[in-house]
Image: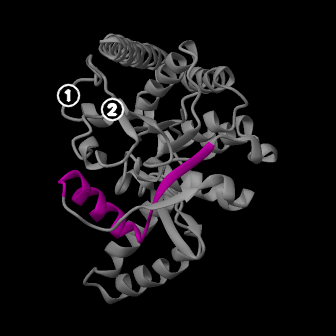
């Protein structure tokens, strides 16, 4: 039996995935093929590159315990300065005074030379974790893995994200099978899949800019359908835009893992955003434990159903044997 695992995006809420990996490892379930978006892509590539489920869980736990101590949300001072300078130059260029307009226009041209689409947040902490835990020299031994990205301009990225949240059809995500790629391209795609517009640096792949895969497909199950018998799907939100019944005609059985406790513990009007940026040790441990409990509950129910089906099958076989003797 081939097992798939889809890890959705959700920034700091990705600590939930650590508990899911633990539950699978404890129950002796090996994952054959992964798929991920955004933080799910980063978690997936770390797990897929590990030599065993035990190592996959241990690596992911180490990553997130380190993030709890060394917060990865660091401001990119250069990008912030350039953004402020751009705003001031634009304001000056629209000022009634001719001298101010000329100065603003000239400043805008100069500032543009120093701009390279860097995000407002520094992605070095993510780069460090990738280099520390992902072994590119042993790709042939990895589990299969796919990640999603969004191709387009920054404006399109923001627009498509809003459309996706509202359930409106739009541009499709791009899907990449990592094991088939060169090391450089693999790296760029993984980083692109977690490149939230404005926050993190855009990535260029084959001459096209790519952003966070969660913009158009935050739960990239598509490429796993038909490639595995059971596909576990981890949600880091209510999963409103995901419907497992879309795949009922496939032989792949979709099993969803959702938080059944309070997932967003932060309070206030921006609580949803705060939950995505909360890398505190207490919150990471809370989400890890929740992921383990939720996944363990799902696996327990699957085993119960499996035993029930086996019992029914045995009883039917006994009836057949009795009928045959008549």
| Residue at the image position 50 percent from the left and 56 percent from the top | 119
Does dot 2 land on a helix, a strand or a loop? Answer: helix
Tell me if mark 2 has few (under 14), some (14-19) or many (20+) residues whose alpha carbon lies within 10 angstroms of its own: some
Direction from residue 196 to residue 94 in the image, left or right: left
Question: Up-down: is 160 above or below 93?
Answer: above
Q: Residue furthest right?
A: 137
Answer above or below: position of 254 versus 156. Answer: above
Q: Is residue 193 above or below residue 228?
A: below
Quadrant placement of the C terminus: top left
Task: Give the magenta-colored segment's residue range.
Answer: 144-167
In percent of width and height, residue 105 lies at: 42, 84
Quadrant of the frame with the N terminus: top right
Residue 268 numbered tag: 1
Say which of 142 and 14 sits in front. Answer: 142
Closest to the observer, 90 or 255:
255
Across and down, in percent, residue 103 comes to 43, 82
Residue 213 falls left or right of residue 207: left
Left or right for 184, reference 316: right
Residue 151 inside the magenta-drawn segment: yes
Instruction: Give residue 216's quadrant in the image.
Output: bottom left
Sequence-earlier tag: 2 or 1: 1
Callout 1: SS: loop
Q: Is residue 8 magenta?
A: no
Residue 121, compared with residue 168, is above or below; it is above
Q: Report which residue position mark 2 lands on.
A: 274
Residue furthest to the front in view is: 326
- Residue 222: x %, y % from top left: 41, 52
Q: Nearer the viewer, residue 72 or 20?
A: 20
Count the marks: how many? 2
């Amino acid at each position: 039996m081939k097992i798939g695992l889809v890890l959705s995006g959700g920034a700091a809420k990705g600590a939930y995935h650590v508990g899911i990996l633990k539950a699978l490892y404890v129950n002796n379930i090996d994952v054959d093929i992964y798929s991920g978006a955004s933080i799910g892509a980063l978690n997936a590539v770390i797990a897929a590159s590990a030599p065993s489920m035990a190592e996959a869980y241990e690596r992911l736990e180490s990553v997130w315990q380190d993030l709890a101590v060394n917060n990865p949300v660091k401001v990119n001072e250069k990008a912030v300065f350039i953004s402020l300078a751009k705003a001031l130059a634009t304001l000056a260029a629209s000022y009634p005074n001719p001298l101010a307009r000329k100065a603003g226009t000239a400043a805008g041209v100069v500032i543009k030379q120093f701009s390279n689409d860097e995000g407002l947040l520094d992605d070095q902490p993510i780069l460090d974790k990738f280099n520390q835990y992902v072994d590119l020299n042993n790709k042939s031994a990895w589990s299969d893995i796919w990640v999603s990205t969004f191709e387009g301009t920054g404006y399109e990225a923001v627009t498509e994200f809003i459309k996706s949240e509202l359930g409106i059809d739009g541009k499709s995500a791009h899907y990449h099978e990592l094991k088939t790629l060169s090391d450089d391209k693999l790296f760029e795609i993984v980083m692109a899949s977690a490149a939230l517009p404005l926050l993190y640096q855009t990535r260029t792949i084959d001459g096209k800019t790519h952003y966070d895969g969660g913009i158009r497909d935050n739960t990239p199950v598509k490429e796993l359908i038909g490639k595995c018998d059971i596909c576990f799907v981890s949600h880091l939100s209510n999963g409103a835009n995901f419907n497992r019944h879309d795949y009922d005609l496939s032989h792949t059985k979709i099993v969803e893992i959702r938080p059944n406790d309070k997932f967003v513990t932060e309070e206030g009007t921006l609580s949803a955003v705060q939950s995505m940026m909360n890398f505190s040790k207490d919150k990471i441990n809370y989400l890890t434990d929740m992921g383990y409990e939720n996944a363990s509950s799902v696996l327990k129910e699957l085993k119960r159903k499996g035993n029930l089906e086996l019992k029914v099958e045995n009883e039917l076989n006994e009836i057949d044997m009795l009928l045959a003797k008549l």
